[in-house]
Image (tube, rainbow, N blue to C red):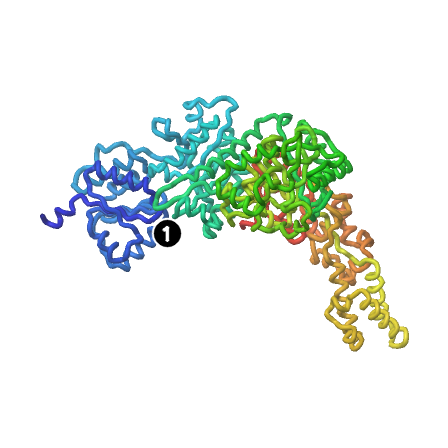
Amino acid sequence: MSSQAALAGQVTVVANRMMLDAKKDLIRQAADKAGLALAFADTALPDAALAQKLRDNQFLLVAMPREMDVQAFEQRLEGLGVALAQPVLQTSGGQFSSKNLDPLAAQILGRYYVNGGRSNIDAFFAAVERVLAGQSLEGLPALIEMPEQGVYHPALAQQFTENPDDILKQLQHREGQPVIALGFNVRYLQSNAMAHIDQLIEWVEAAGVFALPVFYSLGPDARLVELLRGRANALIHLQPVYHNGLQEQLDELGIPVLQGIGWWNDSIESWEDSPSGLSLSSTPLYLALPEQNGLIDPLVMWAEQDGELQLIEYQARAAIDKAIRLAALQTKPLAEQKIAVMVYNYPPGEQNLSASFMNVPRSLALLSQQWLAQGYRTRAFSEQELIDGLGGAIEATHNPKGGVEGASQSSISLADYQAWFEQLPAAVQARINDYWGEPGQSPMLTSIDGQPAFRIPHLDAGHMVYLGQPSRGRPGEDNERALYHDMRVPINHYYLATYLWLRDVFGADALVHFGTHGTQEWMPGKERGLSIYDDSLLILGDTPVVYPYIIDDVGEAVQAKRRGRAVMISHQTPPFRPSGLHGKLVDLHQLIHQWETLEPGAVRDNTVERLLELSAQDELTTDLGWTVAQANARPADFIQALHDYLHQLAAQSQPIGLHTYADNAQVQRKLTTVLQMLGGDFIAAFDLAEPQELFVEDYQSLALTPPYRWLETLLVAKEAVTPELAQWQSLARTYYASLDTAGEWRSLDAALRGRHVEPGIGGDPIRVPDSLPSGKNLVGFDPA
């Protein structure tokens, strides 16, 4: 037999590790139907072995997912010195090119292959067989064109359609039935690798919910609004995000979009054992970019090893359950919904109602009135009622054996808690029990009706409850501060029992973690890509979480977003003003100016002596890094350094009080904040004789300064200003408008109704004015 005869009908497919096993099986089966011998050449092969594979065939198919992969292969080919004389078809990302092929044949083959699917791949190899035999390509099966986006379902005759309404009609979507969309890459459909999507469909439908599997482009040309608006309640996005082009579409679409994550090139077991849960290289595509586009709730849902995709069932079901709970918030009447509000309690102790720069009781009093007006079955509280009632509930949390007057008491029995706890994986139970002991040993247990139980103090408000976040430690132990950010100590039984009570006894439809910040997100578990059995997620179950958070604490907000499955709602810092000088510092500054005008002599010497004495008393000498002896030896130099230091202190931004959530600051305070945002260049525009002296008077004199009066005239009186400073007027108006807090309520309300919340960067509003207005779903940094 000649070597030419031995090669008859030999096709080699060059692929890399990104080709799925299902695609390889599809290719093998189609080649076999066409009577063609087939071989795969993995780009990971050593040079000599790859070169031999490239020579030993009559038709070469280079099938890569990305153009960069094809380019890398071509560069390697040049280095190998392999001259390809046989027909070659190269495909990547829906495009194709050819060598040594008739242009018409190349078009036919390329279109068959890039559209994919069983019928097209069968036709592709039938065409290859004819090309190798020198036969006509007429009479081949019609091409089935794969649309750029569409809907899939195994029950459809052709499995896919461009029109989403076709599947809703054909599969008899019921009026009012929630619809969960599953968004996947078309390459799975083209590769016949749909087993994991089919399984997700089955799990969604088993919950009585309508599954709407959709495929769409990863690029900015995706048309999600066209595909899903008015049809889906939530979308589980089963792809990475490569760009910042989705935000505008998701904002318009208005439904929550959950981020599904893949664990690539390894097994489910390796992910379960991994301390990271997600590689650093995957973080931009599965965490950072999705967050910037407005996706929420990232969960690792599948693993891919050697081209085979395997769903991690408990993770995938958790994502589905969360999507269903979010859909329920959209349709369940507000009067029937139950909302839990849990406040941050730090520093630990009885009746600590605090959060970072937010007045918690005043904020909740205002929100309670708005919730009542919206139609929730609840009651409105005054600020003092919340101080007393919620403070009493927190105090009772520290006194589990008894009660505190004014605090409502509910409980979850030890038996019910144990029944839930014993369903957890054995390793999870062991980890918690090894540190804290068995549930029955918890010091937080008390006797209720003769049975051991965990008492859950709270402030009752009908279908809403307010309560403090449980302590991480044991009662009576002064280690709560140390445990606050400790991600090594496992969660205790009482903490778990409190959240279980919220979910199963109270029946919360949503949970509000109110204020920066609590301890739920600072629990042991994977660094990224958490398991639902990691402590931070274990306590939450599938309950939707909304987390109002201070706008300038971006780093910790990202922690809460990724480890708390939360929609983060930014709230403003307190208003700011230049700190000015207070008390003795005012006197000290005036003495410096007196000294500067005095002639040498006894009065000037006495003034120097008084300056040095006051500086030492207030430890300003030490603050400046001087000793008293150095200051006495070089008084003029010291006084100049002191003068500069007082100017720095006076110009610093100082917060004024606390922010009240969704409540606008007083006009005067907004004006001083705008003054700080505009900065030194704005002050310089007034051409003041001594601009450096502007803020070093008593802080109460700020409203008398020319820049402040100019802002007041422009923004409050809305009158013509002098000097005109046209270039500053627009910016001042923009900054003043951006301090409106209405978005804080709108976004909190939207999140509690299961809707999408627009993402936005965080940061100090003085230094990062683009972080305003508040009320955005906080992200870590500006994608631009």
Residue 688 relative to residue 291: left or right: right
Q: Residue at x 69, y 47 (%)?
A: 476
Can you see residue 292? no
Question: Outermost residue, left direction?
Answer: 1
Residue 409 relative to residue 601: left or right: left
| Left or right of residue 603, residue 114 in this image | left
Identity of the residue furthest to the right in this view: 602
x, y percent for residue 595: 85, 70
Mark 1 highlights which residue? 68
> Which residue shows up at 78% across the image and 43% down it?
717
Q: Quadrant of residue 192?
A: top left
Q: Is residue 334 positioned above or below 276 on the image?
A: above
| Kind of residue indicated by mark 1 | Met
Q: Position of residue 559 (x, y in %)?
A: 57, 48
In the image, 628 versus 120, the foreground residue is 628
Image point 71% across, 32% down: which residue?
Answer: 408
Q: Nearer the viewer, residue 134 or 247?
A: 247
Q: Secondary structure at mark 1?
A: helix
Taking the image as shown, residue 608 lies to the left or right of residue 353, namely right
